[in-house]
Image: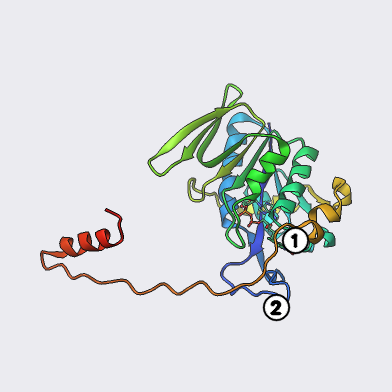
Amino acid sequence: MQIAVCVKQIPDPGDPPRFDAQTYRLDRSGAIILDDSDAYSVEMALRLAEVAGGEVTAVSVAPDGELSGLRTALAMGVQRAVLVSDPALAGLDALGTAKVLAAVARRVGAELVLAATESTDGYTGTVPVQLAELLAWPALSFARHVELEDGLLRVQRQTEAGYDELRCPPPAVVTVTAGVVEVRYPTMKGILSARSKPVDQLSLADLDLEAAEVGVLGAGQEVVGIEDAPVRAAGTMVTDDGTGHVAVLEALRSWKVI
Ligand SMILES: Cc1cc2nc3c(=O)[nH]c(=O)nc-3n(C[C@H](O)[C@H](O)[C@H](O)COP(=O)(O)OP(=O)(O)OC[C@H]3O[C@@H](n4cnc5c(N)ncnc54)[C@H](O)[C@@H]3O)c2cc1C
């Protein structure tokens, strides 16, 4: 089975984010890494391929020929990578990203696409489901476990109460919930072999896509401002002198939780 795994390469969350004062775009000139959310889908894709057979391709849309996050995926064991990088993509929005990823999925002959449920930088959580719609494939979201049995995909979809079991024949797009599997660390051998694995670097023209369709000209979303997240208000401390539960119940009633 040909599995494509979407990999967003993001500025290191350990560094303070910087924004362009005019466009409010995230400054991606510093260290770029594999989004931690996507490490879980890479892990799941590798486990699926190990059991069901097949090849895993990591796919990323990123500016300036950025490869460092893809190299991490290759070092983890992914066989090949595709990077779409094109100056005309500056300002692309979530739907534009999904259109580019759909074109790559078709080009690599993917039968299954894995992605994270949402990224950790400028997340909208909409790219994978838009990708599924563009490919006209089912979207199986919030997966905590994925397996392929007798040619059928079986996904445990995380819910508030537990999980639902979903089944469908591939092709499909599956979004993986962060934290659901233990992610392998790249070994030294993996890091060294990543350097010689194939990386296909594509432009929009290679994918027969027009800048007017996916770049800033085609963007339906616009970032109109950015502000700091509000500081969390201090909580209320209740010292339990044997009647602490009364204060807790009162608080829950005042919030209309009970
Ligand atoms: C108006 C606007 C302008 C933007 N301009 C730029 C820009 O100039 N430069 C820029 O770099 N970004 C830009 N972005 C962000 C970029 O387009 C994002 O990749 C896109 O919005 C989707 O990211 P998300 O975090 O919302 O995806 P989510 O839906 O939260 O991501 C879920 C998952 O989808 C997959 N995915 C998402 N994005 C990618 C990707 N790029 N490559 C591979 N897999 C992916 C990953 O598996 C990810 O974990 C812009 C966004 C907007 C709204």
- Circle 2 residues within 10 Å: few <14, some 14–19, many ≥20: few
Find disc 1 in the rendering and name its residue: 66
| Whether residue 158 can be seen here | yes
**Looking at the image, which residue is at 19% across and 65% down?**
247
Residue at left offset 59%, top offset 75% = 16
Q: Is residue 42 visible?
A: no
Residue type indicated by callout 2: Ala
Q: CA distance from mark 1 to mark 2?
A: 23 Å
Looking at the picture, how far across and down is residue 46, in whole percent? 61, 41
Q: Say whether residue 14 is left or right of residue 64.
A: left
Residue visible at 80% across and 39% down?
A: 107
Q: Which mark is residue 21?
A: 2
Indicate the position of residue 211 as horizontal and vertical percent values: 85, 55
Q: Is residue 243 left or right of residue 249?
A: left
| Residue drawn at point x = 72 percent, y = 37 percent | 135
Amino acid type at image mark 1: Glu
1 vs 2, front mark: 2
Instruction: Where is residue 41? Give x, y as percent.
Output: 59, 46
Give SS at disc 1. Answer: loop
Of helix, strand and loop, which one carries label 2? Answer: loop
